[in-house]
Image: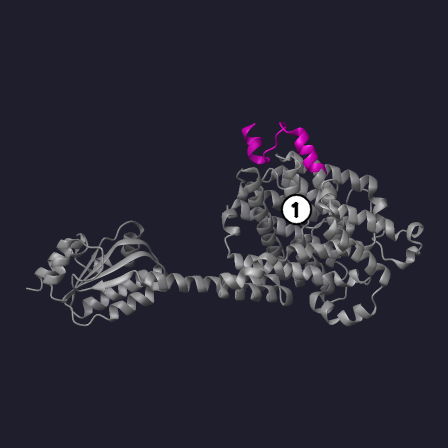
Amino acid sequence: MPAATAVFNRISANNLRGDLFGGLTAAVIALPMALAFGVASGAGATAGLWGAVLVGLFAALFGGTPTLISEPTGPMTVVMTAVIAGLTARNPEHGLAMAFTVVMLAGVFQIGFGLLRLGRYVTQMPYTVISGFMSGIGLILIILQLGPFLGQASPKGGVIGTLQSLPELITGARPLEVCLALITLAILWFTPKQLKKIAPPQLIALLVGTLVSLPLISGFGSDDIRRIGEIASGFPQLQLPMFSAAELQLMVVDAAVLGMLGCIDALLTSVVADSLTRTEHNSNKELIGQGLGNLVSGLFGGLPGAGATMGTVVNIQSGGRSALSGIFRAVILMLVILVGAPLAAEIPQAVLAGIALKVGVDIVDWDFIKRAHRISLNGALIMYLVIALTVLVDLITAVFVGVFIANILTIDKMSALQSEAIQSVSTGDGDLEISDDERELLNQGHGKVLLFQLNGAMIFGVAKAINREHNAISDCRAVVFDLSKVSHLGVTAALAVENAVEEAIEVGRQVFVVGASGTTRRRLEKLGLFSKLPAERTEIDRREALRTAVAGMA
């Protein structure tokens, strides 16, 4: 039993009623979203539905967050849309099959991240970058829905192609479908709270939009409106992995981006689930569960997925407390596909475009965008840069550039703060934390004995400050390097200390290195620093070093 517990998610039969209601409610919300994302991605509604089933089922079985609901999400759909468009353009015959192979590879990456126990590192990036690329993804989703929203096929060329074709899209807009899309948005935005408690707005919009579009009700011919079309009601066919030497590098990069985005999306939602249930998820196990879900989804032609905030929150609010809720949800959706798929053929694409466009609006981090410039101008600029790169270039470039700039600014700030912790004094009048005896010894040195003290974490950015402080030494005959308060000594800072010691030795000064312990001492020993000094100048404390230095002045 313990072995089974270690493999499976926290499944419990103690809350069957709550888990059943949670799973049922999450399934009701997932249905219109899966249809919308499937159509939006270019893989078809069937791919969206089976992605919701398979990712949700395997993530619930093998994940590390009991209440997490996993399914195709807006961010994952945006990346998958680009993957499908790119691969089908390069290889029209096998592009879609290779896109599903990318989903499988993304799952393998996620499993690898989990096995390597990288879960706690995945989301450790600046919020300005997370906000920027999530908002950029939201804008991409909005832009890509403009064609279907206006009653036309999505133009080729992705975001840029859609923006370039916008005048033609507006000119050729089909009034009936635009009206359906606007009705959908109105329902999503203005559904009363009391009605939301009975049925989710997405399902209401889907039903109302479809009913309004039917010829018997609206009086319009069915040929006037673009619809989903037939959805296969049987089990999905196995999609064997397909590779092409010409596209292999692109597929691996796309899989890495998709896998990393899925990890971030899922773990951020796991944090939300923790806050609502007052539990703690297992990040590494969750990544393995997400990876298995995406691997199986790709094998059966489903969209990739991740932890979905909306579905997770609704599941918890409806009583879901164990992984059984996610399993119930997957089974319910599977039954809907197998039994009710023919009914979905009449759903207008404009209605799905309205649902997906609203998701894009919700993904944009409007709250932080409004406040970012007041919190930090640099942070706001990084966020806007990441948004622009996400929309106009690609996600991986946006994240790398954003993280790089944010880290450089952080390192610069930390280096400036740590540089203030590097002090050198040659008299007892300084503000160093030393005893009265040590101050007296410095005074006895008459400015010829220098105490060079480092404090805190010495990262590579403070090496320049160490060199600058040491180069300011002019007329002294002994230097005591005090490392007793160094919590971390980076390689670059260690080399700067070594350089300062060597230069002091070369000009004939007495040199003492005291207080080094733990990893600081081991690092300096590996550099060979202590072999350059006699033991009586490294194996003593600061007071004894000052006393010896002053005695040497006589």
132 displayed left or right of 244: left
Q: Main secondary structure of the magenta part?
A: helix
Q: Tell me residue 545's x, y (percent).
A: 15, 56
In the rendered image, residue 379, in percent from the top left (x then y), is placed at: 51, 63
The answer to whether any part of residue 379 appears in the image is yes
Looking at the image, which is closer to me, 502 or 303?
A: 303
Q: Position of residue 180 (x, y in %)?
A: 82, 56
Q: Is residue 19 in the magenta section? A: yes
In this rendering, would 408 be left or right of 82? Answer: left
Magenta residues span 1-24
Quarter-wise, where is residue 163 in the image? bottom right
Residue 39 appears in view: no
Q: Amino acid at mark 1?
A: Met
Q: Is residue 190 left or right of residue 473?
A: right
- Above or below 493: residue 340: above
Question: Outermost residue toward the left?
Answer: 554
Instruction: Report the residue at 19% width, 72% height from top.
Output: 474
